[in-house]
Amino acid sequence: MTQVMKGVRVLEVAQFTFVPAAGAILADWGADVIKIEHPVRGDTQRGFINMGGIPVDPNRNPLIEHPNRGKRSVGIDVSTKEGQELLYEIAKTADVFLTNYLPSVRQKNKFDIEHIRAVNPNIIYARGSAYGDKGAEREVGGFDGTAFWSRSGVGYAMTPAELEGPLSQGIMAFGDSIGGMFIAGGISAALFNRERTGETVEVDVSLLSAAWWSAGANITQVLETGKTTRNSMPTSGGAARNPLMGNFRTSDGGTINLCMVSPTGLIRDAFAHFGIPEAADDPRFADVRSLIDHSGPASELIVKAFAAKPFAYWRQHLKTMKGQWAPIQSLQDLTTDDQALSNDMLVELEGDDGKPFKVVRGPVQFNHEPLKTTRAPQASEHTETFLMELGLEWDRIESLKAAGAIA
């Protein structure tokens, strides 16, 4: 397997998903990621007992496996002097320091940038935060449900105005996983820059900035016009100005999404696939301008066509259609999607209990090669073996244990 980050060591002092997800991506790409966890409590997320209301098996925890596969876990209490000194020894061997702790915690436990750079001036220092490392709220913590979904305007835009209250995020660690990829990309660019120029930089990504980028075109629209679009209530039918864009209900309650943003050259083929080829000869729908001007009547015809046959029929029948479309799937449907599986989007590894466990690979693939990785480590699983690899003698390891600095 191609490992574009082989030889890079990442020292991760972080928990939950946002920043650890970046470490997981870098581990997927071949980096040696050393995850520092509290020697007693571990990553706080290890204690979560449910995920979206569904009970979590602590030995097969998706919120640990997803952002921590491929790493090594070393248990260090960084609030102790001995633990801090040990952290510095590891930092001397690392290319990247990765954290999501608040500035006050970084200062209190002496692993802010000045402390880490004092022992390794060449290290890339990467921070993930809720609202950024500048400004009055740099000390305010948050999760993707607050910073990415709620405050950013994304949740508001996704909620139809007709509803009494805003939609909740619905997908655990959604913004965290997106933002983690941004951090991994930033770190990659910083390493490339260091290789080319010798310059070391700081990397900052916030959940708020990740959401702003994701909604960037709409935010620019607001700035330009003072107006923006907002999600609408579910209906079966095309958009007001383009009947070949919208969600269409099938006879058995399924939904097909049509997304022909530019219908040029697609109209006749689309109507033929909908089983109403005569519609393409109707002067109201024969060309793009006429189709847009008569979107309502065209939408009514398409709604009736889709309502006449079941979801499975349309899912198969539309495969030869030139225009863009997709079946509306659940996450459970996605796990059996042939196209997704053909592109190696699931990775099987061995869980803590020895049974197979599947995780989603990162969105980047190198040379068409399937990802090979290992399960997320148990808390402090690699403490002794890693410290011996680092060159510590057993007597010192025992003294660090006795002092409560390591697990």
Image (tube, grey):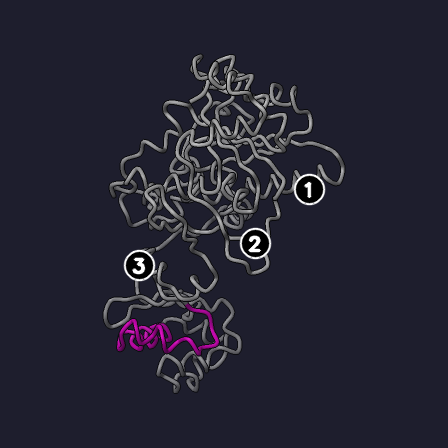
Q: CA distance from mark 3 to mark 1?
A: 46 Å
Q: Position of residue 213 (x, y in %)?
A: 53, 45
Residue under label 2: 1
Q: Position of residue 10 (x, y in %)?
A: 57, 34
Of residue 162 and residue 342, the one placed in the foreground of this image is: 342
User: Are discs 3 and 1 less than 8 Å apart at CB?
Assistant: no
Q: Secondary structure at mark 1?
A: helix
**Residue 81 visible:** yes
Image: magenta residue range: 297-325
Residue under label 3: 234
Residue under label 1: 192
Q: CA distance from mark 2 to mark 1?
A: 21 Å
Q: Position of residue 361 (x, y in %)?
A: 47, 51
Q: Nearer the viewer, mark 3 or mark 2?
A: 2
Q: Amino acid at mark 2?
A: Met
**Is 300 rendered above or below residue 119?**
below
Q: Residue furthest right?
A: 197
Q: Secondary structure at mark 3?
A: loop
Q: Position of residue 368 (x, y in %)?
A: 56, 60
Tag shown at residue 346: none
